[in-house]
Image (spheres, helix red, strand yellow):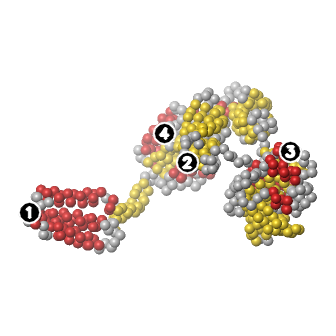
Amino acid sequence: MTGFLLTELPLYFVFFCIAAGVGYAMLLYRKDSKLNAVSKLLKRGLFTLRFFAVSIIAFLLLAPVVKNIGSTIEPPLIVFAQDNSESLESYKNSEYLKNYGELLSATAQEYEIRDFKFGDKVNDSSAITFTDKQTDISQLIQEVQNKFYNRNIGALILASDGIYNKGQNPYYAGEALSFPIYTIALGDTSVQEDAALTGVNHNKIAFLNNEFPVQIQVSAKKMSGKSANLRVFEGEKLVHTTAVNYKTDDFFTKISFMLTADKSGVRKYTAVLDIIENEHSTQNNKRDFMVEIIDSKQKILLLADAPHPDIGAIKRAMETNANLEVNYFGIRDFTGNIADFDMVVLYQLPSVTNSASAVLQAISKQNIPTLYLLGTKSKLAEFNKLGAGVSVQHIAGSFDNAQGNLNPNFKLYELNPNLQSLLISAPPLYVPFGETTIHSGAEILAYQRIKNIQTDKPLFILNSGEINGRAKTAVILGEGLWQWAIYDYKQNNNQTLFNELINKTIQFLSIKADKDRFRVNVPKLVAENQDIKISAERYNKSYELITDSPVKFTLKDSAKVESNYLFTVSGNSYKLNLSTLRPGKYFWEAETLIDGKIEVKTGELSVAQINIESENITANHSILFALSKASGGHLFTETQLKSILDTIKQNPNIKPVSYTERKTESLLNNWWLLLLIISFLTTEWFLRKYHGTV
């Protein structure tokens, strides 16, 4: 390593530092009468000590630094990764674990090593428990690349059965690696006599008293000619049975049926496949799944003065949302009660032929959210009296063709960025020509774009109603929405963008404002390997977020065992991470104090069991072999562990790497210079004190 000295000022300033040391020492000792009785040798010694101390202090004022240029040798890093998933549970307390530990120790004597376990997640825990519920090999490879970026990785030693059930195919994750993967093939590749439930497809949400579809996947190996019953239970109640005949030794089928949602809440169902004698595994014959049953849908009333293609487009868009129940009537045929509906859509009402005064009065009285769609038949003078968030001073008989342009500052809900291309390119709407006035509290979602010229006229506005205390409203100031739906399908082979625009607007209007001053967000259903993250919010009387009191959280399992927690403050809200919980149903209670009053929230939390690791019990060594071959590594069996270290030593690419380093260090940080100055001054003082010259 070489080094050279630099200062903030030119280096010749060192001579001024020396001159300062000489001058200060001469000033102190040249005419000091107290030193007349001492020897010249002592006087010169004291002079020299003061000279060096002052010169060094003056030199440090130049802010000197030392630049070092040298090289660092980095040894190869060997990364070990052990599959910690349940599919390798048979290796607990095995001879393999002993041999694996010996390989770690032997490698650590010659290389730098890092040891990881992987399954659901990647961690550096030293314990091998074989308890992870899923296996994600691709995440491990990505984690190694990210964690040791720009490090001299010699090799990755990966021990697994090759079964992955999470993440992408590990082969693609390891395609561009710059280091070899040495794989240790674990598990049994022989096909065993076994049947399994390999998947359940179902709705996460269903509505009370409705039927919902369930599809269960069944596979069987080496069980040709045998049969079993597939039964589904809700608690102890049998709700479905199907006979399954295994027609081949490599059998797979999908069984579809309907279940009835007869109770609200999170309902747990259990699918059970009969166990046949000599089955290799029985854990994969049972699978739980949960469905949240909602006790009501949002009821939407769609009223129009006359049929129009726009009505069909809007109705079809809303019907894609399973949480909406759409009821369409002509205004003259509607005899129902407005209060029975959560929201109303009025198409060109009030119109020039029907003022719809009774309906409008009922909407106002019940304070029901409303979506207004204007067009050529709208009676705008009457519409302007409704306080919908916008008014139009229409010039009779005059209309414009207007496309849309999204407002980049719109914040009421998230919009798909691809919606902009739809509004700009789709056929224009037929909009009333005249001056428009936006009322206080209204926000523009899209502006009118007429003949490719951007205007400040609104095409689509929403009003939250917060300022005047009235129900939410939305207004689309144009006729011809059906053309947007057709254009969306023509461009994308679906109407996803159009449907999303309508449904997000309906959702915004129909959701009632939450005026609760204590809110707790707890998921209703999570998997057993998923961290449970909870948040809470507290508000003052002005509905501003506050964090001036603690929030307590109590969790009880089905056996009434209680656990107590305390939320931590995070910004303006509260956070709590329960980590993972055992499968089952839990009851929670959150408590806080607001304005001297105790506020309490309660609810249920269901944790679903995961048996994915038991679905596939046949080891997949081919993926391990492919990984090793593609990366320049090698596959070893569990009895060949002692050969791995020898193979690493023989790889000429696994070697130390030399790096050139440039370091700059300030001399002000060197403790020895301070010590040197102190020693000079201390010695000087001691000699003068000893000779009585102080």
Q: Which residue bears the numbered disc 2? A: 570
Circles 3 and 2, Cβ within 8 Å, touching? The answer is no
Q: Is residue 680 above or below residue 610?
A: below
Residue at 46% over, 41% down: 104
Give the structural element (helix, strand or loop) at label 3: loop
Nearest the eye: 409 or 46: 409
Direction top: furthest residue: 277
Dot 1: what SS? loop
Residue 38 shows which numbered tag? Answer: 1
Residue at which label 3 appears: 337
Looking at the image, is mark 4 or mark 1 nearer the viewer?
A: 1
Q: 231 or 498, which lies in front?
A: 498
The amino acid on which the numbered mark 4 sits, given as a three-letter code, is Ser
Tell me which amino acid carries mark 3.
Asn
Give me the C-alpha separation between circle 4 and circle 3. 67 Å
To which quarter of the image does residue 635 belong? top right
The answer to whether residue 495 of the structure is visible from this angle is: no
Q: Residue at x 80, y 67 (%)?
A: 402
